[in-house]
Image: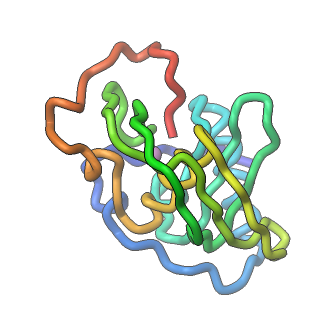
Amino acid sequence: MAVLPVVAYPAPALRQKAKRVRNIDGAIARLIEDMVETMHEVGGVGLAAPQVGIPLRVAVIELPDEETIVLVNPKIVKRSGEREVEEGCLSISGYRGEIQRSVKVIAKGLDRRGREIRIKGEGLLAQVLEHEVDHLNGTLYIDHLESIDKLYQVAPDVETPEI
Ligand code: NI
């Protein structure tokens, strides 16, 4: 396993629409392992492949004290509710923004063994699922800001987890 460098805004890699994974082969298995290790190393709660410069639809999520979720070719199939959240991104360090996210989402995709999975997320998990699927579409949380006044600089040791 290896820790991969996280791409920083405004790298073009963050703006590409990632491609579907056709076959979960050894290279994808390795990418998943490396992404999990990288997420642990940087202390994030989620990471999408474009953030490590790989334009494929792969994301990993790990909320505090929860199991790791691996999502290949994920899709949000249902969203409900709306809430204001404070959000940060590992690729936009030192900033947070206030944006609207869904209260609940349902995501579908494949796990690391290629089995279909369906994840119901509420609160932080819903937020992270939306954030990661956004990354796979080249969208960043700053695109959801109603105004630039809702973006602010924060100290690097701020407690909100980054995604
Ligand atoms: Ni992010």
In the image, 126 versus 52, the foreground residue is 126
Q: Residue 51's spot in the image, x, y percent?
A: 46, 53
Residue 59, by quadrant, is bottom right
Q: Position of residue 42 (x, y in %)?
A: 57, 31
Using the image as rendered, state which of residue 15 and residue 25 is in the foreground.
15
Task: Examine the rendered structure and indicate whether residue 51 appears above or below residue 115.
Answer: above
Residue farthest to the bottom? Answer: 22
Report the residue at 15% width, 30% height from top: 149
Residue 29: x, y in percent? Answer: 76, 65
What is the basis of the colouring in this image? rainbow
The residue that appears at 66% across and 52% down in the rendered structure is 60
Give whichever of 64, 32 is nearer the camera. 64
x 31%, y 63%: residue: 15
* Direction front: furthest residue: 81
Q: Report whether 15 appears left or right of 1.
A: left
| Left or right of 66 in this view: 127 | left
Residue 59 vs 155, above or below: the answer is: below
Reply above or below: 155 against 71: above
Q: Quadrant of residue 99?
A: top left
Horizontal relation, residue 30 to residue 85: left or right: right
- Please tell me which residue lies in front, 103 or 65: 103
**Image height of 6 relative to 155, above or below:** below
User: Relative to 34, is 137 on the left or the right?
Assistant: left
Number of numbered tags placed on the structure image: 0
Where does the image place residue 134, in percent across and percent down from the top left? Answer: 43, 60
In percent of the image, x 62 and y 73: which residue is there?
73
